[in-house]
Amino acid sequence: MKRIGITIGDINGIGPEVALKAVARGRWPDDVEFVFLGSESLVREQAKAMKLPVSRKITFQSLETSCVWNPGTIRVDASRHAEEAIRKAVEGCLSGELDAMVTAPICKEGMHKAGIMIPGHTEYLAELTNTATFGMMLMGGGLRVMLVTRHIPISEVPAALNSKTIREHIELTGDALKLFGLTNGTIGVCGLNPHAGDGGILGREEIEIINPAIRQIRKKGYTVSDAVPADTIFHEARRGDYDAVVAMYHDQGLAPLKMMGFDEGINITLGLPIIRTSPDHGTAFGIAGQNKASHRSMLNAIKLAVDLAGKPNPWK
């Protein structure tokens, strides 16, 4: 039996709605069970209000923190509830009670108001699992995109890039492709500057940092391009030249991916000793509680978690 934990995220967002829809409308093997981590009474309250079915494949794990359902609002109690769900899911995965976890969206502003000072799911999961080297890969629209830097201001990106960090993220990408069944995956790497620096005229990061890191990582057997201009590399990846793209910063990688597959994109955290996936969208407070949210991204995230739960984890 595969047991997939699903954290319901911020109760006042669309997390419970899309999770209920995805489980109910997906086609799942008989040996798969879904464990919702969060208030059963509030999930069922939402299901009743939006006339959504609660699949028989769902069981619930209750939490100690309590909260109320007030759609579209930022509340401290909802954020504390969401944080406890994350911790309990990680504990379940590490103990073997759960085979993978899928996380519904949280509200970072609410987390900070609750005194939970985390930049996002990815960094918090790394902290909870004592993982030093980790990364965030997004998938959708025919693209797989790895981010070297994540949730930092764009003004801080150049200083955050160094050879070690770039090598680590390329290596994580290569290992992920093997996990996906692509034993000889090809990785394209974005330059930081327009035209990948244009020979140093528009910036020297490609010459001094990015390409030297690429040359070093090739010695480990990974198939990696030189730094490629970011305005062409995603077209080339969609054409089939690359199985994954390593982007230098958040919007460089996610703008084209969301353009190609906004309603279907998913996130997987690489480097963890556990399997974690998530939909690539936020809490969508503006439509919470209205039965308007698309479940496609959550469905894809759950499908990937189910698939990977049965495979050897290269980082375990």
Image (cartoon, rainbow, N blue to C red):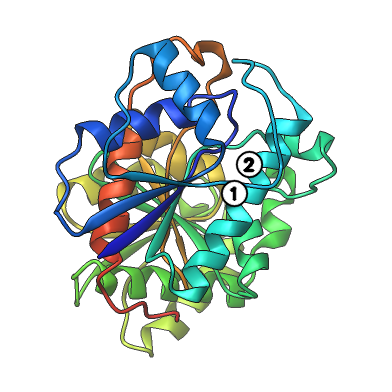
Label 2 neighbour load within 10 Å: few <14, some 14-19, many 20+: many
Q: Is residue 16 visible?
A: yes
Residue under the image location 49 percent in, 39 percent down: 104
Residue 164, x across and y down, in percent: 60, 77
Q: Does 218 appear above or below 14?
A: below
Could you tell me the amino acid type at mark 2? Answer: Ala
Say which residue label 2 marks. Answer: 82
Residue under the image location 30 percent in, 79 percent down: 312
Q: Does 256 appear above or below 288?
A: below
Residue under the image location 39 percent in, 19 percent down: 293
Farthest residue to the bottom: give it.
Answer: 219
Query: From the image, which quarter does the N terminus lie in?
Result: bottom left
Disc 2 secondary structure class: helix
Q: Which mark is residue 214?
A: none
Front one among 49 and 111: 49
Could you tell me the amino acid type at mark 1? Answer: Ala
Q: Tag count in the figure? A: 2
